[in-house]
Amino acid sequence: MTPASEHLPLPPDFRTHVHEALKQWYADPGEGSTIGYLNLVASERNHGAVNIREAANRVLNKGLTALAMTNDAGANVLRLRFLDGQATFVVANRLNQSQPTVYRYQSQAIDQLAAVLAEMEAGVRGQRQTLQEARLEPASYLRLFGIDAQRDKLLDVLLDSAPPWIVSVDGMGGIGKTSLADATAREVIRRRHDGEVAWVSARQQRFDLGGAVWQVDQPALTSSALLEALTAQLLPGTPPFTTSDKAVSALRATFELRPTLVVVDNLETVTDVESLLPLLHRLSGPAKFLLTSRHSLFGEAGVFHMRVPELGEPDALSLVRLEAEQRNLPELVAASDAELRPIYRTVGGNPLALRLVVGQSHVHSLASVLADLQAARGTPVETLYTFIYRWAWDNLSEAPRRALLAMPLVTERGGSLDFVAQLSGLDPGALSDALAELVTLSLVDSRGSALDRRYTIHNLTRTFLLEQVIRWQ
């Protein structure tokens, strides 16, 4: 058997926890159990144990049964000492052994019982990890670039048992919000073996790398649909609830038992976000909710906000080479940075656009693909721009449109409010409101410090504004 200490993240003193749990066999159930954090214990709670103490005792009993198969004498000593509550000298007399010998048997048996329970826990954890990962959508990436800082920050917030309870990840279409949420959720599953992770998608469209948009065959994510999806994942086998209040109460009771992360992916419109926020606030705490959306929630109270930046040039070119390798385009893999740099200058660090460029390189030369993007010609390119920008553009009023159309004249470093006002012809007050709307819709980036804000756009947005948007006006 493998020593219990090797089954991380079980605590190093797991053996002591097992010993204390044996001594707690007849203690007040309200005191809980020193092994109450085990998935084994949670499983017994789900199978009828009325409290943590009863569940822990069931786990110990199963462990002793397993131990008896290899060390019947040791298992017998533990049963006599803790389950039957007999003193050491009584056990020594019964077994015709000295008290030091009984103590030695007991110590060895506790070591072995801890190892048995660690093996059992590892099996349950593996099953739980497989079950929870099956709730996620299939990963759309082989490797992610440039997300470590964002993922680590999200983990710090999501694994903390304190507020904020709702975390919003936003950014323009194709920037990698879902991939970041997926990578973060998988890491939460790996690290937190006593918790739950659920995944609910509001995706209505999917863009493939051949340049086509596919409608997803599912209704929009309403409050009732969200509750139904969560109860199906977290309360399997439960009959349908007659009211939303009952569903909320049942879910909150589950959240109190186990730390829970719920990912709600692709809330793409203002309507999606605003319709679900009241329900999310009712459900959250102690459960954490991670939302991905093109619509920023930076103005919403009680929401931790994170914007996904575009990839920097080194990460963007690494992604291009990885995609080219997976698509059997050796010439693109072997290309120098200088040869690939025009891709970055044209589409910036938007992963979806970068992957589209690689995909189109199966048919056209790289120069031709980039020329199509710059001129906004060809079905794949027009479809990409429509997928990323059309809804937002159609919902802009006059002032935000004027501000956005002026942004290609702003450098990547960004321009001040006064500078953008000069370019757009808007007075500072109207421009301030317009920029707030554009930032909320992930069309403009606001960078800098609290004392010096500067506004800029992604390279792909710049390319889009120079050609495609003219056809939509």
Image: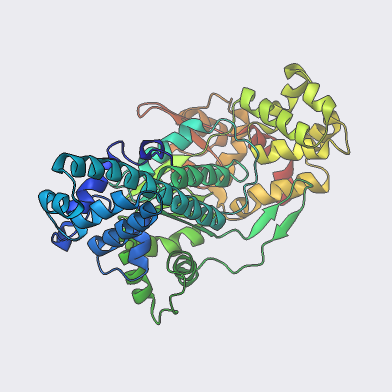
Which residue sits at x=70%, y=39%? 353
Whether residue 466 is visible, yes or no, is: no
Q: Nearer the viewer, residue 342 or 101?
A: 101
Quadrant position of residue 408 = top right
Q: Nearer the viewer, residue 412 or 253?
A: 253
Which residue occupies the extreme bottom position in the image?
Answer: 242
Colour treatment of the image: rainbow
Which residue sits at x=23%, y=61%? 53
Quadrant position of residue 234 = bottom left
**What count of labels does the image hold?**
0
Q: Position of residue 254 (x, y in %)?
A: 34, 64
Which residue occupies the extreme front position in the image?
Answer: 96
Q: Nearer the viewer, residue 413 or 228?
A: 228
Q: Position of residue 215 (x, y in %)?
A: 69, 62
Whether residue 27 is visible, yes or no, is: yes
- Classify residue 261 as left or right of residue 81: right
Tell me: residue 409, above or below residue 432.
above
- Classify residue 454 as left or right of residue 207: left
Which residue sits at x=33%, y=47%? 113
Q: Position of residue 322 (x, y in %)?
A: 71, 31
Which residue sits at x=63%, y=35%? 143
Q: Nearer the viewer, residue 93 or 40?
A: 93
Q: Position of residue 386 (x, y in %)?
A: 70, 50
Of the 4 image quadrants, the one containing the N terminus is top left
- Classify residue 242 as left or right of residue 232: left
